[in-house]
Amino acid sequence: MNQKKQNPIKKLLSVRGMGGALTAFIGLIIIYIAFGIINPNVFSGQNVMNLLRSMSKYLIIGIGQSYVLITGNIDLSIGSVVGMSSMITATLMTMGVNPLVAILISFCCCMVIGIINGFLVGKCQLPPFIATLGTMFVARGIAYMVNGNRNTDAIASGIGKEPAESFQNVFYYGQTAGVYNTFWIAIILFIVFFFLLSKTRTGRHIYAIGSNVDAAKLSGVNVVATVTKTYLVSAFCSFVVGLILCGQASMGNMEAGNMYEMYAVAAGVIGGISPLGGTGILLGTLAGSAVWQTLENGLNMIGAQVGIQRLVIGIIVVFAVLLDVVVRNGVFKKKATS
C-alpha cells in the first residue's frame, strides 16, 4: 500500500529536470512570503498583476534560451535581437506602415538571425559563445542603423493614435479576464513550447544532442537541423519580447533588450536548466523567471539598491550552476552509497 502511494511521487521526481524545477518553486514561495512579511504591499493585487506582467518578458526569453541551453549551447544574441525587433517594428510604424506588416518584416529579420546562429553553430561548428557574440553585435548594429542611430518617435506619429493604442493594448497595457495580455502571451508560448519540447521527436532530439552529440549523430539525429530549430525558437522569443518593449514604451529604443541574454540564462539556470546540456524542463524556466522577478520586485519594494539586487541574483545563479555541477559529478550518490 505505502509503495503504491509513493509511486506517483517517485514518477514525478524521475522526470528529467523536475527536481530543479520543484526546488525553484519552493524557493519562489519562500522568497515571496519573506518579502511580504517585510512589506505587506508585496501581497497587494496590483503588485501581483504587475509582477506577472514583468516576469512574462523573462519567461519568454528564458524559453528561447532554455531550448538552446539544453543542447549544450548558448545564445548571446537574444538581447540584441530584442532591440532589433523593437526598433524595426517601431521605425516602420512611425513611417506609417501598417502594424501587421511592420510586425511581419521584423519577424523575418529576427528569423534570419536565428538561421545564421544555427548555421554557424550547427553546420560550421563554431563555438556558440563566439558565433552568437558576433550576431549579437550584428543585431545591435542593425537596431542602431535602422532609424539613423537614434531612438524613434512615438509610433502614434506614423500610424495614428488609435492603431498605436491598439498595438500597445495587445502587447502590454491591455487586459483579458483581469490579467495583462503580456502574461497571456507568455503562458500561450509556454504551453506551446513545453509541448514541443516534452512530447515531440524534435524535443527528444534536443535532449539527445545535449546529453551526447556524438551518440545523437550515430542514432540518426540531424544535429544541424535540430540546433538550428533551437536558435529559431530563441530568435522568435526575442522577437516577441521586442514587440512587448515597443508596446510598453510606444516607441523604439536602440538599447532595448540590453543584458536580456543574461536574464534569459538566469531564468533557465535558476529553474534547473543545465548550462552543460541535456537536462531541464520548461517548468523550471517558469519557476526561474518568477524567482528572478520576485527578487527584483521584492528588493525594490524594501528599498534595496540596484547593486544589491544584481549581487543577490548573481549569487543565486552561480549557486544554481554549482549545484548542477555537483549533482552531475555524482557527489550525492557517492555519499549515499558509501
Image (cartoon, grey):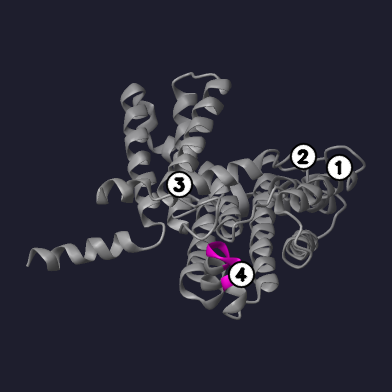
Q: Amino acid at mark 3?
A: Asp
Q: CA distance from mark 1 to mark 2?
A: 9 Å
In the displayed orientation, state which residue is furthest to the front: 338
The reply, left or right, for residue 116 in relation to residue 61 is right
- Kindly identify the residue that appears in the image at 34 percent across and 26 percent down: 40
Label 2 Cα neighbours within 10 Å, binned few <14 / some 14-19 / many ≥20:
many
Please identify, in this view, whether the residue under mark 2 or under mark 3 is nearer the observer.
3
* Residue matched to label 4: 214
Q: Please, what secondary structure does the residue beneath circle 2 have?
A: loop
Q: Please, what secondary structure does the residue beneath circle 3 have?
A: helix
Q: CA distance from mark 1 to mark 4?
A: 40 Å
Please name whichever residue, 327 or 185, is drawn nearer the observer in this view of the structure: 327
Q: Please, what secondary structure does the residue beneath circle 1 have?
A: helix
- Could you tell which of marks 1 and 2 lies nearer the N-terminus? 1
Please identify, in this view, whether the residue under mark 1 or under mark 3 is nearer the observer.
3
Stretch of the chain drawn in magenta: 209-215
- Kindly identify the residue that appears in the image at 86 percent across and 45 percent down: 141
Task: Check residue 253 in the rendering and tell me which mark sits there, or answer none.
Answer: 2
Kindly check if marks 2 and 3 are in contact, taking CB atoms under 8 A apart as contact.
Answer: no
Q: CA distance from mark 1 to mark 3?
A: 38 Å
- Could you tell which of marks 2 and 4 lies nearer the N-terminus? 4
- Image quadrant in which the N terminus is located: bottom left
